[in-house]
Image (cartoon, helix red, strand yellow):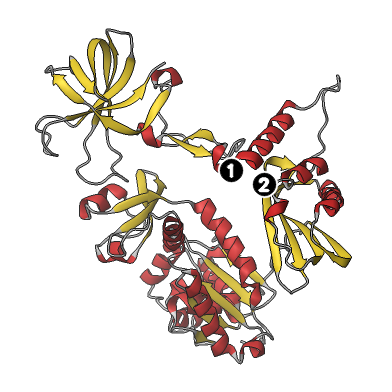
Amino acid sequence: MKTERRIVSIWLPNFPIERWQKAQARLGNDLPDDLPQVLAVEGTHGPVVHALNRAAALAGVTDGARMEDMRALCPDLQVDFADPEGDRTALDRLTLWARRWCPWTVADDWAAAGSDHGLILDTTGSDHIWAGEPAMLAEMEASFSLLGFSVRLALGPTWGAAWAQARFGAVRAICADPAPLPVAALRLDGETVLLLNRLGLRTIGHLANLPRLSLARRFSRAAPAQSPLIRLDQMTGHLPEPVSPPEDPTVFRADARLAEPIFDPTHHLPALCLALCTQFANAHKAARRLRLTVYRTDGTISRIEAACASASRDAGHLVFLFRDRLEKINPGYGFDMISLEATVTESLGTQQVDLAGSTDTGLELAHLVDRLTARFGRDAVTQLQPVASHIPERAEIRAAPLDHQQRDNTTVSALPRAERPQRLLEHPEEINVLYAVPEGPPAQFQWRRRSYRVARYQGPERIAPEWWQDRPGTRLRDYFKVEDEAGHRLWIYREGLHDDGRGGNPRWFLHGIFA
């Protein structure tokens, strides 16, 4: 291997489940480490395991297995759906974050039999900054550990060599001999690896000792990425495999440097917004989130942020977003520099009103939402969005207004909206049954110290528990739409059945109120 390049491969074997655990911890929903947890994705014959924690692996759960089989093997298994797109976005952010060690970093998105998450860094000439290659690898591992990610690292002269050592070699291997590694270390798919093993070629050394002409003939019809000969040449450096990082994202920022310290940025804000919107117009972009930073004379900074309901490059509107927030800035003994930066942007082409010259109603609505949010807070202005769930309290969530992000609603009930009550209680409230009947809802019940006598009803509508996220023993529900003698229409349900083996007698709850 005659090359002076130094490539570091960083493998994140548990990236999806660790990212999910970090998100749950931020929400206060973290589960004990000894509880088996998996993330599932849709497969050909139903959900399959996409990622799992250590407790699930010790319980016998395997990656790629069907969820039905794993639930039978481990009844206490906690299941949630994976977010592959979110994992990819987070990996791209990690790619930029890893440029603290070198300027050439890319996401290693090669995948086989599931998913494979990693980073590739071209650290040629950078190791002296970290007191040598061993110290640099140790510092990388410690940095990822502080982020909450477990990693395996290796350094080699090529992308393929570093990739192989990170996954199949020793811990923090540096330019180790790849000959003893299995042929799977050549980044081949499962079928090619199985074929090579059947031919008696189990290690890279066995493969390298074969005549090249024989390998070329045997795999002449294989795709380049699945050709053992091409992968071997990439590992040894005979075929180039450069690390080509993506371009840095464009930074939209406007600065105002002041001759004398001031205490109020109000008079400089319109000019900063106008300069920023000019940059947006040239790049066909618009702002979704802004950050105003003041640099104080004592060397510290103070910043505030504002967000738009929809992408905007209207300078006057951006000034309005900060109008009631400027008082939150701590000027200290004054500041001599003001910076306005767009932290989140979206593409926005040239907009044109209709021929009559009327304004865009959608734009007016977005500005109204921004004004309400600025006045009452972000949590006070929300909208309901559907979620893929049959359980009524899980079928909708509160999201940001004007958030048109597409969601996977393929499993949402196809019932029209009129079949659901206009008011759904945040938590179902248990009712006291006064006169029960064998079939159907109770003839009379009590709720909030008031008695209701059922005059007519419709149902039942049976909703089974979601086995992939509900706890074992969760009982099914039979919903009824009932109307009392005074005309009040309520939505009640019976939890469980007699002799269902999941508890005592069924319980009744009120869940919603119709108009």
- Quarter holding residue 26: bottom left
- Residue at 75%, 57% in the rendered image: 341
Depth check: 355 or 448 in front?
448
Depth check: 1 or 483 in front?
483
Instruction: Look at discs 2 and 1 and give the one toward the viewer.
Output: 1
Secondary structure beneath disc 2?
Answer: strand
Residue 175, above or below 431: below
Residue 450, above or below 306: above
Residue 512 placement (x, y as % from top left):
35, 24
The circle drawn on residue 378 is 1
- Residue at 21%, 52% in the rendered image: 75
Secondary structure beneath disc 1?
Answer: helix
- Quarter holding residue 229: bottom right
- Residue at 77%, 40% in the rendered image: 317
Q: CA distance from mark 2 to mark 1?
A: 9 Å
Q: Amino acid at mark 1?
A: Arg
Is residue 224 visible in the rendered image? The answer is no
Q: Residue furthest right?
A: 259
- Residue at 49%, 79% in the rendered image: 165
Contact between labelled residues 1 and 2, with CB atoms less than 8 Å apart: yes
Depth check: 358 or 435 in front?
435
Is residue 200 visible in the rendered image? The answer is yes
Q: Quadrant of the C terminus?
A: top left
Q: Earlier in the sequence, mark 2 or mark 1?
A: 2
Residue 2, above or below 235: below
Q: In the figure, is residue 341 to the left or right of 94? A: right
Q: Which residue is mark 2?
A: 307
Depth check: 79 or 73 in front?
79
Q: In the figure, is residue 167 to the left or right of 277? A: left
